[in-house]
């Protein structure tokens, strides 16, 4: 069972990211005063400011931030202070090049950007521990500081590590895991292509090979190693901070990036998880934009993932202006209303603190086009006006602070399958498209859902909260997970599995069992044949109750057990007419086996069949372009409706409900303007 969240915001809060080291000191007080006027009460600082504390090795000074924090006390501004380990100073990387990350070919990443270090260099660990300790001793009891951010965006920019320090650490990690070379050779299947190891010194990180192909079992362990390294680096800093912080200070870090077990990191090192939300990426120049697509609404899928880590999280960086570097990323400014919409999107999905990035657009460096609230000219503008509007909205929505998300169903994920999908092209071809189609099907069905991540200590009670669970393509299946799923179904749950389920073990090797492997007894199905959809044939469909549903990418041809019902059949290719969807009763529950990749249309049909589509239809009727999110607290439910389109949409409230934003009681047709948001209280 996962630990309960250790810190929750006492009130809905608005913040901003600020960089005093980038601005003349004469601006500081007026900046803080203007922030407060707009409703901002918290700022994040110092994540890239190592040289302000240690300009030369071992010479520590705190005068600069002492002056700034004294001003924060005077202006009653609260501060989230950061450890500055994401950008080591030039003296460090020049003197200790072993701290640098490298390409697979061994070329070092040099000073000049950020996140160019590796987690495993003993020298870097020592120097990071020292600067963190110095900061914690000096600022740990400071009255302005309410929380600490560790590093910045772990595994951002680069999420693979090939330095000599990483190679050495990987060998130790592998030896600790497998203990003996025979066990390692067995796990990695080294009998294939004569890859066997006879000495531990022969074990290395993935290295350049013919055609770039890596032993998939080694590769899967390598991704696990990257995660373990990042978590250890974060935990090292957290343990130092906790020795010195005043009571009540929280510890966080901001993500969400690949190859990090964020659940483990949060349990071991953090009090609350933070996310950086930039929906404007959906409109980056060069993309083909379909006005019927979900576009910026797709950030709700990412927020759903964050909520699975911290049910009530914080946004450390919330979009306030257009994205852009001098070298890449060109995106338009948020249209009037979008800044507010995106902030409310975060709030709807569980954020109790929203911190905008950033106060003023930088006038120097790579991110001069990553716009903040203010432009270079420092004048009040429409974005500042919207930030003030968000502050006013948060004041009206205070009853929601700490409210839980209300889900109609759950989607199961786990890190083994997440990372195997990055290693195995066949798996990856299924993983990402199906995850997206489930999200789109749920969004258009107005069926809010949660992500449920399985870990070593997950208990059936965590699954039993959901009437229906979808486990899209559980390629890797273990006996422990199979037993957990069996217990969930046995006590009355409905489990939906997709094609390509259960044919690998935890090492990524295929098992000599009929698919779906360890879940065969539970699903009451046997995969007798399987294939990718052929580009030479018509697009695959599955016929269910006379409706031809898209069934993309892959097909499992199912053979049902005696007590298993066939609900639908394949409608194309040589397997036309063969079972494609089965339903098997098990204990008080049932298992549905969908023998294909998921499509949004198929998801909507499955949700309807299992009784979880449109769970709030008796409360509100909404067009597909409007997102529905519900939060719940103290017996009350709060219904968020968000319009992501540049035109007015009309919703219909089926019963009288009070708008927390306008204070009016509404029923019947309600116009939701372009990029408009409303929040209704349901008793």
Image (tube, grey):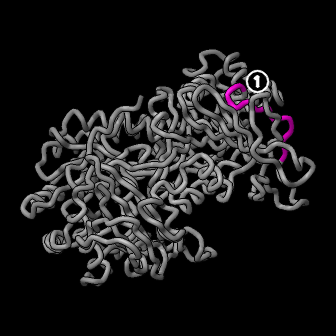
Which residue appears at 80% of the width and 46% of the height?
555
Badge 1 crowding class, 10 Å Cα cut-off, few under 14, some 14 to 19, many 20 or more, is: some
Q: Is residue 626 visible?
A: yes
Which residue appears at 31% of the width and 37% of the height?
238
Eyeballing the image, is 163 above or below 512?
A: below
Q: What's the magenta region?
A: 521-531
Which residue appears at 19% of the width and 68% of the height?
39
In this rendered view, identify the residue nearer to me: 150 or 356: 356
Q: Is residue 449 magenta?
A: no
Residue 72: x %, y % from top left: 13, 60
Which residue appears at 16% of the width and 44% of the height?
138
In the rendered structure, the answer to whether residue 648 lies left or right of residue 521 reads left
Residue 492: x %, y % from top left: 54, 31
Q: Is residue 90 visible?
A: no
Residue 611: x %, y % from top left: 56, 48
Residue of label 1: 196
In this rendered view, identify the residue nearer to me: 296 or 584: 584
Residue that protrudes farthest toward the right in the picture: 574
Eyeballing the image, is 205 above or below 294?
A: above
In this rendered view, identify the residue nearer to me: 438 or 445: 445
């Amino acid at each position: 069972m996962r630990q309960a969240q250790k810190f929750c915001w006492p009130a809905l809060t608005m913040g901003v990211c600020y960089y005093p080291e980038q601005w003349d000191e004469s601006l500081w007080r007026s900046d803080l005063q203007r922030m407060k006027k707009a409703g901002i009460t918290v700022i994040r600082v110092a994540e890239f400011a190592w040289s302000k504390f240690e300009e030369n090795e071992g010479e520590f000074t705190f005068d600069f931030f002492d002056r700034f924090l004294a001003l924060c006390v005077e202006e009653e501004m609260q501060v989230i202070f950061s450890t500055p380990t994401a950008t080591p100073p030039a003296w460090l990387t020049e003197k200790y090049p072993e701290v640098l990350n490298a390409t697979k070919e061994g070329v070092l990443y040099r000073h000049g950007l950020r996140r160019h270090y590796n987690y495993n260099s003993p020298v870097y660990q020592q120097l990071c521990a020292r600067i963190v300790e110095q900061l914690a001793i000096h600022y740990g009891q400071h009255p302005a500081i309410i929380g600490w951010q560790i590093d910045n965006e772990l595994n951002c920019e680069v999420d693979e590590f090939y330095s000599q320090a990483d190679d050495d650490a990987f060998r130790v990690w592998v030896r600790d895991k497998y203990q003996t070379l025979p066990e390692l050779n067995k796990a990695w299947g080294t009998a294939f292509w004569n890859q066997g190891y006879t000495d531990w010194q022969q074990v290395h990180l993935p290295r350049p090979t013919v055609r770039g192909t890596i032993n998939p079992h080694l590769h899967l362990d390598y991704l696990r190693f990257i995660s373990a390294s990042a978590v250890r680096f974060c935990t090292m800093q957290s343990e130092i901070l906790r020795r010195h912080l005043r009571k009540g200070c929280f510890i966080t870090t901001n993500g969400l990036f690949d190859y990090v077990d964020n659940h483990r990191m949060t349990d071991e090192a953090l009090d609350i998880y933070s996310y950086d939300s930039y929906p404007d990426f959906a409109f980056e120049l060069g993309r083909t934009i379909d006005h019927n697509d979900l576009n910026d609404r797709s950030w709700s899928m990412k927020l759903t993932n964050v909520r699975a880590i911290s049910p009530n999280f914080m946004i450390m960086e919330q979009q306030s202006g257009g994205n852009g570097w001098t070298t890449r990323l060109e995106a338009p400014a948020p249209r009037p209303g979008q800044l507010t919409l995106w902030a409310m999107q975060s709030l709807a999905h569980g954020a109790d603190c929203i911190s905008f990035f950033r106060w003023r657009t930088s006038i120097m460096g790579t991110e001069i086009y990553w716009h903040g609230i203010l432009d270079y000219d420092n004048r009040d503008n429409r974005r500042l006006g919207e930030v003030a509007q968000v502050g006013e909205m948060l004041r009206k929505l205070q009853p929601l602070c700490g409210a839980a998300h209300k889900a109609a169903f759950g989607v199961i994920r786990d890190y083994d399958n997440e990372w195997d999908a990055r290693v195995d092209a066949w798996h990856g071809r299924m993983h990402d498209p199906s995850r997206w189609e489930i999200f789109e099907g749920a969004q258009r069905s107005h069926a809010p859902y949660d992500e449920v991540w399985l870990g070593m200590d997950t208990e059936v009670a965590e699954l039993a909260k959901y009437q229906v669970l979808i486990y899209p393509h559980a390629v890797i299946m273990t006996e422990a997970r199979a037993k957990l799923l069996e217990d969930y179904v046995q006590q009355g749950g409905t489990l939906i599995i997709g094609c390509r389920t259960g044919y690998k073990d935890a090492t990524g090797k295929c098992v000599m069992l009929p698919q779906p492997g360890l879940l065969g007894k539970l699903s009451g199905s046997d995969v007798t044949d399987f294939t990718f959809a052929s580009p030479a044939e018509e697009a695959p469909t599955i016929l269910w109750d006379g409706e031809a549903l898209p069934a993309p990418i892959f097909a499992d041809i199912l053979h049902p057990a005696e007590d298993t019902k066939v609900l639908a059949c394949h409608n194309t290719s040589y397997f036309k007419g063969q079972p494609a969807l089965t339903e098997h009763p098990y204990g008080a529950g049932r298992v549905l086996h969908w023998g294909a990749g998921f499509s949004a249309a198929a998801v909507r049909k499955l949700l309807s069949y299992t009784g979880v589509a449109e769970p709030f239809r008796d409360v509100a009727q909404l067009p597909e372009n409007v997102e529905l999110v519900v939060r719940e607290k103290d017996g009350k439910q709060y219904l968020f409706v968000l319009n992501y389109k540049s035109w007015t949409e009309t919703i219909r409230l089926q019963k009288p409900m009070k708008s927390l934003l306008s204070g009016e009681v509404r029923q019947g047709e309600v116009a939701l303007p372009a990029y408009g948001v409303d929040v209704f209280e349901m008793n």
